[in-house]
Amino acid sequence: MELDQNEAQAIVSELKRWHDEARSLVNDAADKSRLSSNSIDLLKARLTKLKGEIKDAAKYETLSRRKTPKTDLEQFFFGPAVRSTSANFRMRTDTSPHSQSWVRGLYEVELELSYALHNLEAYLKKNS
């Protein structure tokens, strides 16, 4: 497999961005006593955006979000990562940040993305 460093970095960046947003959503909802109705609405909007981005990426499994031939990195790393994360993103977008489902659902997303990042970064380290 030919290694395109720019593409590899783009995939790592995208997966990390989603991972960090999932972690941020958990952290921002951690202090339940400080959650106002406005902050809950903002958290739900961010959750909806995150879920939409991942589901959209899973449609074509390409960085471009278009139906184009997949590169090797997309085929072996990005595609499986978004497909698995999307399939395991079972949390409804109307889930309350007050509930344990919020933390549990986002933890599953984080875990999937961490696994994908670990595999890709290990591959890049070995083949750079």
Image: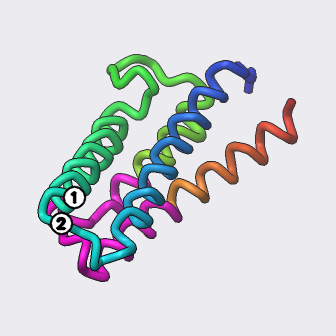
Viewer-closest of 42 and 67: 42
Marks 1 and 2, Cα distance to the nearest angstrom? 5 Å
* Residue 76 falls in image quadrant: top right
Q: Dominant secondary structure of the magenta stretch?
A: helix
Q: Is mark 1 on a helix, strand or loop?
A: helix
> Does the segment drawn in magenta span residue 50?
no
- Residue under the point 85% across and 34% down: 127
Name which residue type carries label 1: Ser
- Residue 74: image quadrant is top right
Left or right side of 5 for 18? left
Relative depth, front residue between 61 and 93: 93
Q: Name the residue under label 1.
A: 39
Q: Residues within 10 Å of mark 1 (few under 14, many from 20)?
A: some
Per the image, label 2 sits on a secondary structure element best described as loop
Find residue 77 and report its horizontal and vertical position in percent: 58, 41
Residues at badges 1 and 2 in contact (C-beta under 8 Å)? yes
- Residue 74 is left or right of residue 22, and the answer is right
> Magenta residues?
84-111
Residue at position x 35%, y 31% in the image: 60
In the rendered image, residue 18, in percent from the top left (x then y), is placed at 45, 46
Q: Is residue 93 above or below residue 34?
A: above
Residue labelled with disc 2: 36
118 left or right of 104 in image: right
Q: In which quarter of the image is the N terminus?
A: top right
Residue pictured at 77% horizontal, 42% vertical: 123
Query: Left or right of 53: which side holds 113?
Result: right
Residue at point 39%, 17% (across, down)? 68
**Pointer 2: residues within 10 angstroms few (<14), some, or many (20+)?**
few
How far across and how far down the image is residue 83, in percent?
40, 48
